[in-house]
Image (tube, rainbow, N blue to C red):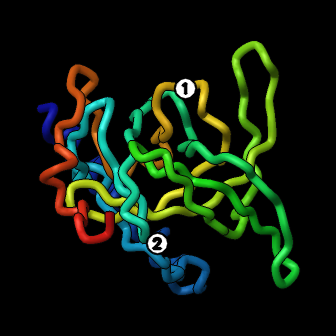
Amino acid sequence: MIRSCVAPRRRAASGAVLLMLWGLAASGTAAAKPTAEPVRDRDQPRERAVMGWLESVFFRPWNVRMTAKLDTGANTSSLHAERIERFSRNGEKWVRFALGRGDDHKKLAVERPVIRMANIKQHGKGSSQREVVKMTLCKNGREYETEFTLVDRSNFTYPVLLGRSFLKDNALVDAGSTFLFKADTDPCRRPDAE
């Protein structure tokens, strides 16, 4: 009995939806616009690597290895930078900074265009504006281009913080593990570039 009551309602609802879609298509208002990215089924899982809450990453093109903290509590990724200088190139905002080389403590001079300014909230200190640049990092044989805010992280234990903007599409964090991918065996490591 329930089946006979539900089925006609479904058919009527389906028919009404089809008529509405046909009417929109005929009027041209429901024309699909092309998108730059393919539509992904929300039920389909993304391919993301499981990483520990600490991992070694290599910055390209210099092959600089740094320890990164994967932080789901931070939205934006952050990179330790010293001697940050703002300048203009061809009418665009750029930044020059010293990037630490990890264990040998040598610094590299890096120049990047400023993508945007980020308003960063700091506990007990209000907020501050930071430059955001794109950098390429390599992890487990795969390269990622992602945005980083630049800040002096010398008072922090780890020079790199990878936030949700990076993690959401690329990694799942195993909070009970560290260095699931060993730096010495990572295909990103290029001994000839060190």
Residue at 25% across / 62% down in the picture? 188
Horizontal and vertical percent position of residue 55: 30, 39
Q: Which residue ends up furthest to the top in the rendered image?
A: 124
Tell me: 86 left or right of 68.
right
Q: Looking at the image, can residue 163 be seen?
A: no
Callout 2 environment at 10 Å: few (<14), some (14 to 19), or many (20+)? some
| Quadrant for the C terminus in the image | bottom left
Tell me: 92 left or right of 53.
right
Q: Which of 164 and 77 is in front in this view?
A: 77
**Secondary structure of residue under mark 1:** loop
Residue at 46% across / 32% down in the picture? 158
Q: Which of marks 2 and 1 is nearer the N terminus?
A: 2
Amino acid type indicated by mark 2: Leu
Disc number lying in front (2 or 1): 1
Horizontal and vertical percent position of residue 44: 22, 53
Judging by the rendered image, the residue that carries numbered circle 2 is: 21
**Secondary structure of residue under mark 2:** helix
Callout 1 environment at 10 Å: few (<14), some (14 to 19), or many (20+)? few
Tell me: 106 left or right of 110.
left
Residue at 17% across / 44% down in the picture? 182
Judging by the rendered image, the residue that carries numbered circle 1 is: 156
Residue 154 quadrant = top right
Residue 67 quadrant = top left
Asked if 94 appears above or below 55 in the picture, the reply is below
Q: Looking at the image, can residue 149 be seen?
A: yes
